[in-house]
Image: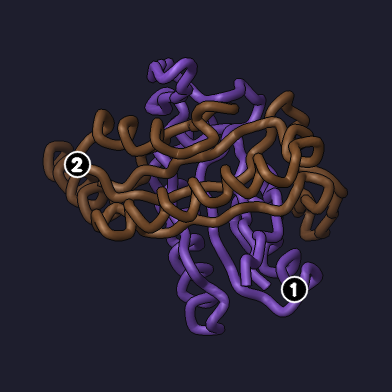
Chain colours: A brown, B purple
C-alpha cells in the first residue's frame, strides 16, 4: 500500500532557528531518507519552498485565474512530503513518526487510491447490478 | 524546475455524482496524465483516499500520538497531487490549469527545494 505523508510545521520557526540547529535537522532528514530508501519504502519525497512562493490556480467558465499564496492559511504549513510504500497503516504511522518534523509539527498520513483494485471493485459492483 | 500541484476540491461532491459523470472525469484525469507523461512533464501523481481515512501523527517527548482525521479541516480537501517538471512557474500554472479539478476546486502550485 502506498501512503502520502504530508509534513506540516511552522515555517517561521525555520527562519528564526540557529543555523547549527537547522543543519542538524537537515542531516536527520538526509539520514531518514537514506534509511527508507534502503528499506525499499521510499517512492518519492520533496521539500517545498515557503508558502510565500505558492500560487493557487482556478478555472471558471474556461478562464484561468491565479492568486498568490496557498489555498488555505494555516497555523502550520505544508513544508514537504514523502510518498512511501508500507505494509499497512500502522507501518505507515511508524515511518511517519520517524520524520524529524513529527517532533516539531505534525505528519498527516493519507492512503492513496490503488486504481488496479479500484477498477476491480467497480467491475464487481457492476457485476452485482447486472 | 519541479513543482508540486496540490489538488483541492469538495470530496463530498465526488461521493455524490452519478457513476457516468465520475467515470468521465476520471477519464479526463487519465488523458491529462498521459498527456503530461508524453510531454516529459510528469514525475509522480496520486489520487488520495478521502480525508476520513487520514491519520495525523505527532511525536512529543519521544511518544507517538496518532489522531484520526486530517491535519486541518477545510471547506475543500486535498484529494491528490501531481509532481511535475516544467521550465518555469508560468508553464507550471498552464499545466495546473489543465488538471480537471481546476474547474471545480483549485490547484495550489508549490515550487520544490532543489538541494543541488
Q: Is residue B106 above or below residue B50?
A: below
Element assignment for label 2: loop
- Is residue B68 visible from the viewing direction of this image? no
Can you give x and y, in whole percent of width and height, for residue A5 in the image? 45, 40
Q: Is residue B48 left or right of residue B96?
A: left
Say few, some or many: other residues with alpha carbon within 10 Å of mark 2 (under 14 / 14 to 19 / 20 or more). few
Which label lies toward us, 1 or 2?
2
Q: Is residue B27 left or right of residue A120?
A: right
Q: Is residue A37 above or below residue A52?
A: below
The residue labelled by disc 2 is: A87
Closest to the observer, A1 or A120:
A1
Name the outermost residue toward the bottom: B39
Closest to the observer, B80 or A92:
A92
Say few, some or many: other residues with alpha carbon within 10 Å of mark 1 (under 14 / 14 to 19 / 20 or more). few
Closest to the observer, B53 or A4:
A4
Q: Is residue A128 left or right of residue A7?
A: left
Can you give x and y, in whole percent of width and height, for residue A42 in the image? 35, 56
Q: Is residue A22 above or below residue B35?
A: above
The image quarter in which residue B66 lies: top left
Q: Is residue A11 left or right of residue A107?
A: right
Q: Are marks 1 and 2 in contact (CB under 8 Å)?
A: no
- Is residue A75 visible from the viewing direction of this image? yes
Chain containing mark 2:
A
Closest to the observer, B55 or A130:
B55
Identify the residue at horizontal 38%, vertical 19% (top origin): B64
Identify the residue at horizontal 14%, vertical 43% (top origin): A124
Q: How many marks?
A: 2
Circle on res. B91: 1
Element assignment for label 1: helix
Amino acid at each position: 500500500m502506498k501512503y502520502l505523508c504530508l509534513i506540516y510545521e511552522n515555517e517561521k520557526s525555520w527562519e528564526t532557528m540557529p543555523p547549527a540547529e537547522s543543519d542538524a535537522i537537515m542531516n536527520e532528514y538526509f539520514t531518514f531518507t537514506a534509511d527508507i530508501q534502503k528499506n525499499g519504502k521510499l517512492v518519492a519525497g520533496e521539500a517545498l519552498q515557503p508558502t510565500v512562493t505558492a500560487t493557487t490556480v482556478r478555472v471558471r467558465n474556461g478562464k484561468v485565474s491565479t492568486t498568490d499564496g496557498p489555498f488555505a492559511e494555516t497555523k502550520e504549513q505544508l513544508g514537504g512530503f514523502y510518498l512511501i510504500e508500507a505494509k499497512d497503516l500502522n507501518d505507515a504511522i511508524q515511518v511517519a513518526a520517524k520524520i524529524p518534523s513529527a517532533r516539531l509539527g505534525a505528519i498527516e498520513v493519507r492512503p492513496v487510491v490503488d486504481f488496479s483494485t479500484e477498477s476491480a471493485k467497480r467491475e464487481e459492483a457492476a457485476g452485482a447490478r447486472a | 524546475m519541479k513543482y508540486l500541484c496540490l489538488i483541492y476540491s469538495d470530496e463530498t461532491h465526488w461521493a455524490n455524482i452519478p457513476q457516468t459523470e465520475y467515470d468521465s472525469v476520471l477519464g479526463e484525469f487519465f488523458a491529462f496524465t498521459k498527456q503530461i507523461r508524453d510531454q516529459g512533464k510528469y514525475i509522480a501523481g496520486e489520487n488520495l483516499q478521502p480525508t476520513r481515512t487520514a491519520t495525523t501523527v505527532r511525536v512529543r517527548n519521544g511518544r507517538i500520538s496518532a489522531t484520526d482525521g486530517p491535519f486541518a479541516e477545510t471547506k475543500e480537501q486535498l484529494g491528490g497531487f501531481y509532481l511535475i517538471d516544467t521550465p518555469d512557474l508560468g508553464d507550471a500554472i498552464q499545466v495546473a490549469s489543465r488538471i480537471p479539478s481546476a474547474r471545480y476546486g483549485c490547484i495550489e502550485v508549490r515550487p520544490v527545494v532543489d538541494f543541488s
